[in-house]
Image (spheres, rainbow, N blue to C red):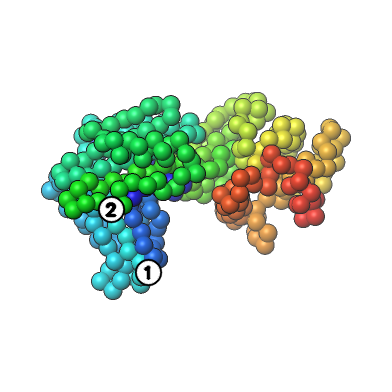
Amino acid sequence: MNGTSTVDSGWLHGAARLRDSGTPFVLVTVVQTRGSVPRETGTRMLVTAQGTVGTIGGGHLEHEAMAIARRHLRLAVTGAHWQAFALGARLGQCCGGAVELMFELEVGAALDWIDVLHQALQRGEAAVIASVVDGVSHTRLVLAPSSGAWQRGEADATTWRLARDLLTTPALTAPEGPPSPRKNGPRRFVQRIEPPGLDVWVHGAGHVGRALVAVLGLLPCRVTWVDSRPDEFPSEVPPNVRVLCSDDGEHEVDEAPPGACHLVMTHSHALDFELSLRLLRRADFRYFGLIGSATKRRSFEHRLADRGIDRAMLCRMRCPIGIDGVSGKEPGVIAVAVAAQLLGLREEIARGPEPMGWRNAGAASARIAETQC
């Protein structure tokens, strides 16, 4: 089976932590699905003797998968193993579909593939990971544009071809391989893993900023969290969050990549204004949200217009932030409403070549002027 995945790659951070601590784990991967199932192909979960990272959908399927994985750990079962599950009465689940899971024991020093894959995603590059099971032989191949290839075992020509096709042809979601493994022949799972689709910059580490980052830490996005006050950042942040303590927030706006999403929610209205001005002059963001009321928006609009920002650009400023219909002012409520707005944007990106927002700013602004201005 082969495909393209934009599923949560949080398991990768967990794998790195377990590798660094010397903790053996079993990597459980959904390699095939039919009908109604809890999670999509490519979803992964890590199982250790004491705990788990990630989920393949919960319920009895996950409970049984954990038991199998821990048996592999206890018996030091090497290689990789596939197993099919029908989501019916035996598992106490009424989905009605079926899944195949792959169990791979990960232990010892041969885990450099984690770094190759992680570094590619950090650079914003897609990468391909392949597993081949042929009897007792277990081969893994990781292919990344900047890092080249990493192999454990010798990948065969078919696996190489599938991996290269997926890496070089993003639109290709299911390249043709052997139609089905011959009896006792090799089984392959070749998957393109995309970096998170949203690059989110949170400017401000106050109550709302902390609540928002906690929520974003659960979502498939990259977060850069900027503030000048080091004591405002918590001692631990989610693995997809980069803390940037800087006295020059305006400079950090300039350093953000094109197409990023920005949330401005600092401790200072004056700083909020300067960051807003900087972002609107750049004009290459996907999303710009400014915390505040409709009154704050009107005040900022007048001042920004005086500084040369035209109405079309002002219409791209989301203020108040969050989805319609949620009016609570508690930090957690605002955080969830904003995260929902960003998830809506992510869905919009997935549906079309260009979302309403940054490259086609003029047309987008005309469409949203009625509701946002």
Q: In this view, does 31 lie above or below 196?
A: below
Name the image quarter holding residue 33. Answer: bottom left
| Residue drawn at x 65%, y 41% as measured from the top left | 286
Find numbered disc 1 in the image and state the secondary structure of the residue it sits on.
Answer: loop
Q: In this view, does 247 lie above or below 300?
A: above
Which residue, given by chain and number where applicable, does mark 1 sit on? Answer: 95
Q: Residue 267 carries which label?
A: none
| Residue drawn at x 55%, y 35% as measured from the top left | 224
Would residue 69 be seen by someone viewing this image from the given angle? no
> Is residue 199 or residue 323 the one in the foreground?
199
| Residue drawn at x 66%, y 38% as measured from the top left | 285
> Is residue 8 or residue 37 the one in the foreground?
37
Residue 333, percent across and down? 59, 56
Residue 37, percent across and down? 38, 63
Quote the CA–CA distance across marks 2 and 1.
Answer: 25 Å
Other residues around mark 1 within 10 Å, as few (<14) / some (14–19) / many (≥20): some
Find numbered disc 2 in the image and state the secondary structure of the residue it sits on.
Answer: loop
Asked if marks 2 and 1 touch (Cβ < 8 Å), the reply is no
Disc tally is: 2
Which residue, given by chain and number where applicable, does mark 2 sit on? Answer: 180
**Could you tell me the amino acid type at mark 2?**
Ser
Q: In this view, does 253 lie above or below 51?
A: above
Q: Which of the two discs, 2 and 1, labels the residue nearer the N terminus? A: 1
Name the image quarter holding residue 66. Answer: bottom left
Q: Is residue 1 above or below residue 249?
A: below
> Is residue 132 or residue 113 the one in the foreground?
132
Would residue 201 be seen by someone viewing this image from the given angle? yes
